Image (cartoon, grey):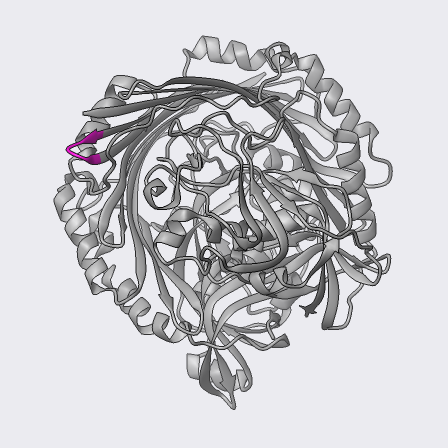
Amino acid sequence: MFYDIREVDISSFTITLEDGAVEKPKIVNIKSKCFRVLKNGFWGVFIGDVKDDEGLREAERNVVARGDSEVERSTSRGKYEMKPKIPPWDVDVEEKIAMLKDLHKSLKVRSAKISYMENIKKFYYRDSDGSEVEYTVPRLGISIVAIEKGKTLQFLSKRLMKVGGFEKLKEVFKLTEEINKILPKLVDARSPPAGEMNVLMDSKLAGVFIHEAFGHAAEADHVLQGSSILSGKIGETIAGKNVTIVDDPTIEEFGFFPFDDEGVKAERKILVENGILKSYLHSRETAKKLKGKPGNARSEGIDFPIVRMSNTFLMPGDYRFDELLELCRNGVYLIGSKGGETNPATGYFHFSAQYGYIIRNGEISEMIRDVGLMGYLEILNNIKIGRNLNFDPGFCGKASQTVPVADGSPEILCRAKVGGE
Amino acid sequence: MEWEIFSEKIVGYSAEIEAGKLKILKKVVDKAYAVRVIENGRVGFSAGRDLEKTIESAKKIAKISEEVLKEFPVEKAAKVDGLYDARFENISNDYIKEEYEIVTSSIEKARIANALIAHEIVEVELRNSSGAELTEKGTFSFFSVETVFNGGSGFAQTQSRKIELDIEKTVTYAEELALKSAKAEKIDSGYYDLVLMPQAIHQLFSHTLYPSLSAENVARGRSRLHIGADLGNIRILDDPTLPYGFASYSFDDEGVMARRKVLVDGKVLCFYSDLKNAEKFGLTGNGLRISIDSPPVPMPSNLIIEVQERVDKSRALIIHNFLGAHTANSVSGDFSVETLNAEFEEKAIKGTMIYGNIFELLSKIQGYCSDRVQIENTLTPAIRFRSVKII
């Protein structure tokens, strides 16, 4: 029998500025425990804030069948505490509100919602093999949603979210600068063209592209479920030689964690190297079954950990932006992400840009809005990659659990299908 | 000082099936509090597991709030049938194992990639300084399944306030979608009549139409809609009193009595509202919390979609599910989304997007083509639309 006990204590503080006024400020404290017992190849689980012996008894009571689950047994011990330069909780609330009000004043829009969020996650893990792990990681961020009306009613959202302290927010006013520059034009922007075409993506959109086009299919639980097009393809060429994709939870971006939710020390993992599939992302269970390395099991709060990405990125290539523009020649240049979704079983994925521009004869031309894109994994066979790697923070949803991630990429040029008029 | 204490106790059971095998059985027991206080007219909010600390935090944070509320309401609870099924109290592991047996026996050719069976008892209590003392015990069952077959996949879900779930029908539907999807072909771009099946209606409307009917969004100029705006041949009711409705309740999360209202009858008649916006938009009983950790905001309950004329599905592109519906524009109503399970003249279709605007799409309604079913909080038939851009 194997068991583990996870205890999570998250304290968060949120301020929302609705059209300049502080509304719905909140303090939330979540504390609970998850008990897992693996017996006869079956997982019995209990979630509740009870003593360890009671929780384990309840979990074992849920072992109701025989199964084929087994886990990679490894013992982890360690403590980690991220100590930010300027701890968010040491900054006066008045200073935070003043910053939000300054951000609001700097916006020239019809309506805006500005949210500040800080939280501190304390994590404790122990298992039947003697693992004992604990860590403390603070996260914080600001998101802005601005609304304006022209020919159409439009919104533009921007966010800055990091692990660490208040010092990470020093560039927050760049968000309002971009909104003031783009939104007045976006309200009068035209619909995008339709069909398959050359698509030049900025690094934020390209990061989501890598996350959706490849990342989810590399999650080994999908492989075991028979719902990933990457099943059985380790060692095979699945992308162009210029494509190297990495998942690295140890980088201090929004998807950072020092240990995963199964107590395994976080490690950088090369998923694709020069176009060849090298590894899937693994939990202890998928690692055991597919002979991989665990360390990628994550959960929202105290739910059952499942295989997830962290900071996932495409390694830079050789192209300058002006070279990509010239190679694109005619197509679209798409900027920012409104999110995406993938079907790992078919390899088809969908994602949307915040706005973009027509590229005509290698020149950036008129603005376009509401650009949705679709594609499939084979697109990675022929992409041209820029030089400047940037990360974009976000939240990734899977099996009703949401976790913080960061998607990274340089600008890329590819062919994809664009939905438009 | 005015105060409101909202508590939620959850006892939940769920089973996860992976690659056709029962893998995890989980029990969750949780009780949490959400407290709002009004101090000097300012509203503070806090949530947590310790009531005393939560009250102190709410009082502390009220000092920085600029949100104004006079008082908390005292209203009765509406009488709503079918909120609670006493049989949930005796759910056994054997019952869930029997449900799993139904899952596996319902599928023939395709395989179950993953499935979730969940049953939950939720006990809500609301007390406030105005004298409200309300309680409600509700039960919820949910089932979702993803099937795969030769590179194709299908997704379906069902839910109920009763302990019984229509697992067999849902698995069969998901299997049909996977089998068809395995033979999917591409079709030419162009304008096609479209039939959106209930799951697709829920996915698209949730992200394009429903936000525009929120009183908060209208008040802040974040909606295109206004009272009297023409939405075409459609009637939309918000009804938290619907017997056995998955999103039914007897009082909302602010203690306002549940009320049935017609939001749209060809034209926009009203918006769903919380207490804060009630002065302008009326008390509609739609102040709901996304979770115990969030203060109430305007959210819809059961949205009942009614369309007048029965029509057939012939020569229409039939869409069962969308991929990326959440990336649609919730403010303008524009969408550019991908079909996940679609068919045209009996043949499955892949690699297809639809492009348009929800308000223009509503003006193209031709009629309904199936009985009404509930998908999460949407009750809708399949609906046929004329001439929509397919890419």
Q: Is residue B347 above or below residue A6?
A: below
* Observer-nearest of B17 and B154: B154
Q: Is residue A250 above or below residue A29?
A: below
Q: Can residue A273 be seen in the rendering of this structure?
A: no
Find residue B225 and report its horizontal and vertical position in percent.
46, 58
Q: Can residue A90 be seen in the rendering of this structure?
A: yes
Going by the image, does B148 lie left or right of B199? right
Going by the image, does A379 lie left or right of B122? right
Q: Is residue A316 above or below residue B42?
A: below
Going by the image, does B364 lie left or right of B346? left
Find residue A175 and report its horizontal and vertical position in percent.
29, 63
What segment is highlighted magenta in the picture? B38-42
Going by the image, does B20 lie left or right of A5? right
- Examine the image and state in which quarter residue A340 appears: bottom right
Find residue B279 and report its horizontal and vertical position in percent.
32, 42
Magenta stretch: residue A30 in it?
A: no
The quarter of the rendered structure image containing the C terminus of chain A is bottom right
* Observer-nearest of B348 and A90: B348
Find residue A62 and report its horizontal and vertical position in percent.
61, 15
* Observer-nearest of A240 and A188: A188
The quarter of the rendered structure image containing the N terminus of chain A is top right
Q: Is residue B135 above or below residue B160?
A: above
* Residue shown at the point (56%, 45%) measured from the top left: A281
